[in-house]
Image (tube, rainbow, N blue to C red):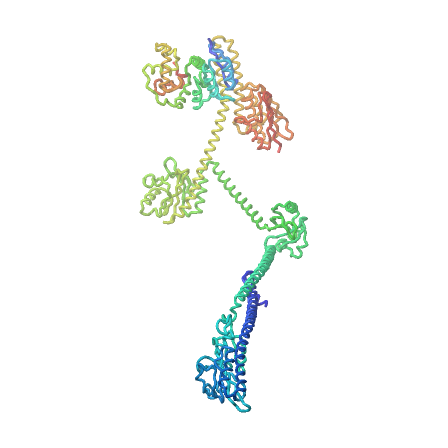
Amino acid sequence: MTIRVLVADDHKVVRKGLRMFLAADPELEVVGEASNGAEALRLAGQLEPDVVLMDLLMPVMDGIAATEAIRRELPGVEVIALTSVLEDNAVYGAMRAGAIGYLLKDIDAQELCRAIKQAAAGQVSLSPSAAERLLREVPPPADPKPLTHRETEVLQQLALGKSNQQIAKDLVIADKTVRTHVSNILSKLGVSSRTQAALYAVRSGLVELESPDRTTWTE
Amino acid sequence: MDRVKQRLLPLALGPSAKALLAAAAVLMVLLCVWWYAVRWYEARLLSEERVEALAETSLRGNALSLAINRRLARLQGLYAFVQVESAAEDLDARFEAFAEGLYAVAQGIRYLAVAPAGTVRYVYPQRGNETLLGYDMLQDPRSQVRADTERAIESRHAVATGPVELFDGGLGLIARQPVYQGETFWGLVAIVLDVPVLLQDAGLTGDSGEFDFALRDSEGQVFFGPDPIVDKNPVLVRVQLSEETWELASIPVAGWGSATAGELLIFEVGGLVIVALLAGLAYLSVNRQARLAEAVRRRTGEISSISEQYRSIFESTSDGLLIFDLEGRLVDFNPAASHMHDYTPASFAKVEPKDLIHPTSMPLFDQLLERVRANEEFHGRGMGLHQDGTPFHVEVDGTRFVYRGEPHALAVVRDVTEEVQAYQLLEQRVQQRTHELATLLDASASIASTLELRPLLGLVLDQLGKVVDCAAASILLLEGGELRNIVHRGCLSGEDPSLLPFVGKGDRDLWTRMLGNEPLIVDDIQGDGRLARALRKALESHPEGPHVRAWMGIPFTIQEQLRGWLFLYHRQAGAYTSHQAALAQTIAHQAATAIENAHLFAQTRRLAALEERQRLARELHDSVSQVLYSIGLAGHTALTYLEQDPDQAVEPMRYVLSLADAGLAEMRALIFELRPDSLEKDGLVVALTRQAAALRARHELEVKTELCQEPDFPLEVKEALYRIAREALNNVVKHAQASRVVIRLPHPHDAAVLEVQDDGVGFDPQREYPGQMGLNSMRERAAELRGALEIESAAGEGTCLRVRIPAT
């Protein structure tokens, strides 16, 4: 089953390039193109893609507003911010709006395909520099409660960008147990998303952020 | 009289006082009249009373007289008897019988006596009168009686004497008559009457009624009644006895006037009341009249004084006053008005408005008349004319004015020539001052724009030299924790003063002070003070050091932060005072301001540069980086296909090539942007063509250009057109969702025209759009060159934006 992708970018050259590039991966299918945020929101509602690649600087409605609207109205649609902008509030804004990934337009093209697939599986993808920004920008949880040993292990895995199934497989526990652990972790840390939990893990040294020249920190 | 009046009038305080005076005069006259009337009436009453009294008294007098004479008549009877019977023998008996008859007739006869040869022989009644027998009448001890007796004998008439005190008591009236027989005296007959009885008979005794009576004899002796009556203006009635006359005097019991007193009182009081009423009436009428007269006089005075005042104000006011009728004819004026126009009053009366008003100001005069006719005020400034035709500035107030009962226009004219000239002079000075300031500002701006602080601070020091006496001066800035000389005037002018840091850091106390914010004065740095010693050491290596005696340091701050010091050196000890410190402080302030300005300017420039860089970054992001990213994607794709299915790699490769072209176009357009003289060098047509190419490459839009030959516009027009075109194209890309764009630059006729037309979604040009799509900045650009922006658009109809800039 292919992953259905909606591309939202105001630059036609980028849309066309992306469509061409993603078409080369048989697991991915570009189902639509939007030239601004409003169009992206409309097409997301119509096409119900699995993942939206969202440029942030767009006319009419910017990417962050569109991300927020899509995540609010279509919780099943994951959004990856794909942008050449690297500003603190853009990263933070996109994450707060509910983007599951934040990728710069300078990454290795293969990483893009992988990030789309991870997003479709509910996994966080952050380009390393974006992650650094987030660490600086996102306030630490106000009053985190101590995690159990198992929960810490799960958090480590989560922070490495693994999906629940992968974590279950690697730790040899049931999927359901992983979900319970994740839920407990979120509530104990007082955060609302896996991304924020992963950031907490990075911040508290549970996982090492890999060097920026390496593409991402997954696996 | 008039003089008296004049003298009195000031005293007569007012109308009521005058009326009082008049009333008092009337009262006096009336009182006199009343007095005389009362006296007259009183006299009348009195005379009436006296007449009454006289009547009463006469009555009584007659009664008395009758009573006496009736009784004395008995004497005649006795005389006759004696005449007849004197020779009779039985005279005794006969006398007794006859006398009894006489005696019985009336009361009051004391006795009757017959005295032959004067000696009483017969007396009746004998009882009680026995002692009389033998009494010789001729020898009466009472001289009066004796004299009367003798007179009676001589005159042969009866003589009455009395009243006399009778021997046996009581008051009596004695009457004797001699009896002659032939020529021979025979003797006397006598009768004696009791006066009280007579008086009683006459009704004078007892209750005599309303009157008191008194009797006096011929000697004037009062023998009856109260003595004082005769002194009280009595009514007198004679009572004739035979030879004597008594007088009966009477006055009313209560005195004269008492009976009429009531009547008189009524008359008096009545009279007084009338007098008072009359006087009051006189007062009122005089007072009213006087008041009226006074009011009239005062009002008249007021009116005449007001009118005089008006006239005198009119005459003496320094503003020219001109009265025109509503047709604009001069009717009256004051001397100031004629003087203002250099006319004599006599000749001024004949002038017409056109002689007084400069032709350029005639419309103002018409306006004045018009406003006055409409009963409105007029205020204006214009030009008046002197008699010789030279103009002068006037300020005129016009108002409606009733003159001789008719509406007129009053024009108040003020010569404001001096004021206007002063104002013009002031304006000149302001302009001059503005010019100076502008020059100064230009100078400081040019200095600041070099970002070179030193010349500016040098100027500051030069300025300082004019204000505060010093051998040398320097400005030091606090940089990197030490004070560095930036500029210096003195021994080492010309050398680079920045080489000389202030070496005061070694002394903790001195350095603490240098980091403080207090001006420092050292009278003599060769002296012994702690500060002097520290400073001496600090300035040891300073070229000024050996010569300096007095020293002054003025700190200056920027936004309350110490930024540096102003040092002044003097070769004379004690040269600096707090006054000079204050002066130097103002200079230091300027230095601070100069530094701050320089910093701000630099900051602004940095900001501007930063903005420009950011704009370029955005441009790059929007154009080249997207293209490059896309090239990367397409390249990856091509690589992927080359491994799997090389045929499929062709399309992405072609795309890479086209993208490379597009990137090149974008880069050219960008480089064009970056080169400041590119528009001037390459021209507007080239610039627009490049934009069109970049647009095609970047957005795959169909961009058509309809451009004329490079037009001969001024550079600023070309720049404005190019910027507007770029902004318009930007809008097309961002908002229009168009597939076709046409850029037109038609051959110019009277104006430079540029059009950008698309087939996109269109919009309502009247609506406000958030961010305004740059429309405002486009409008402003056009307006700066007196141009205009037109937009034809509607939803779904595409947009045509046209800018038109007129040829200058």
Q: Nearer the viewer, residue B321 or B353?
A: B321
Seen from the viewer's position, the closer of residues B447 and B257 is: B257
Identified at 60% across, 51% down, the residue is B415
Q: Is residue A199 above or below residue B92?
A: above
Query: Image quadrant of residue B701?
Result: top right
Question: Does residue A137 appear left or right of residue B243 in this picture?
Answer: left
Residue B547 appears in the picture as rendered: no
In the image, residue B593 lies at what x, y percent? 44, 39
A190 displayed left or right of B636: left
Does residue A32 appear left or right of residue B547 in this picture? right
Which of the pair A38/B690 is nearer the observer? A38
Query: In which quadrant will I find the N terminus of chain B?
Result: bottom right
Q: Is residue B706 visible?
A: yes
Residue B665: name its quadrant. top right
Query: Which is nearer the eye, B277 or A55?
Result: B277
The location of residue B643, given as percent across then percent down, is 47, 9
The correct choice, above or below, for A110 with respect to B41 in the image is above
Please, which residue is most extreme toward the bottom here?
B184
Q: Position of residue A83 (x, y in %)?
A: 47, 20
| x and y percentages locating residue A112 in the rendered image | 45, 15
